[in-house]
Image (cartoon, rainbow, N blue to C red):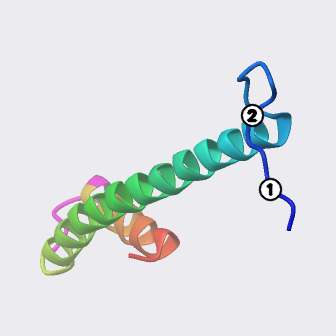
């Protein structure tokens, strides 16, 4: 059986090992970025849901308030909250 060598005779890492480590680094970076964005999205959706639920119970006093309530509900629907 042939032995796999990770380094060259000079002690440097082989090119395929370097590429594997860079790929692993980018993979971990992507994973943690996606996890962070998902966490922030849940927090933002929580705020939008809380405001929308409250505003759905309020009778709009004027046209600006009615437009605000409708737009907030559209954001909630568009974001899938």
Name the dominant secondary structure of the magenta segment. Answer: loop
Q: CA distance from mark 2 to mark 1?
A: 12 Å
Span shown in magenta? 59-64
Tell us which disc is closer to us: 2 or 1.
1
- Which residue lies under the disc numbered 2? 7
Q: Are marks 2 and 1 in contact (CB under 8 Å)?
A: no
On the picture, is 51 further left or further right than 81? left
Side of 47 where 36 appears, left or right: right
Residue 61 belongs to the span the image colors magenta:
yes
In the shown orientation, is residue 29 left or right of residue 53?
A: right
Task: Tell me the quadrant of the picture where the N terminus can be found.
Answer: bottom right
Q: Identify the residue shown where x is 24% and y is 71%.
A: 52
Name the one closer to the observer, 81 or 10. 10
Could you tell whether 5 is left or right of 24 in the image?
A: right
- Image-quadrant location for residue 73: bottom left
- Considering the image in quadrants, where does the C terminus appear? bottom left
The crowding category of the residue bearing disc 1, from other C-alpha atoms within 10 Å (few below 14, some 14 to 19, many at least 20), is: few
Q: Position of residue 60 (x, y in %)?
A: 19, 68
Residue ranking furthest to the front: 1
Q: Nearer the viewer, residue 14 or 53?
A: 14
- Residue underneath mark 1: 3
Q: Secondary structure at mark 2?
A: loop
For image coordinates 21% across by 78% down, the residue present is 56
């Amino acid at each position: 059986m042939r032995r796999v060598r990770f380094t060259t005779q000079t002690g440097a890492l082989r090119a395929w090992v370097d590429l594997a480590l860079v790929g692993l680094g980018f993979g971990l970076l992507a994973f943690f970025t996606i996890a962070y964005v998902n966490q922030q999205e849940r927090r933002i959706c929580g705020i939008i849901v809380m405001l929308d639920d409250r505003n759905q119970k309020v009778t709009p006093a004027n046209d600006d308030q009615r437009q605000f309530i409708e737009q907030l509900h559209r954001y909630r629907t568009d974001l899938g909250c």
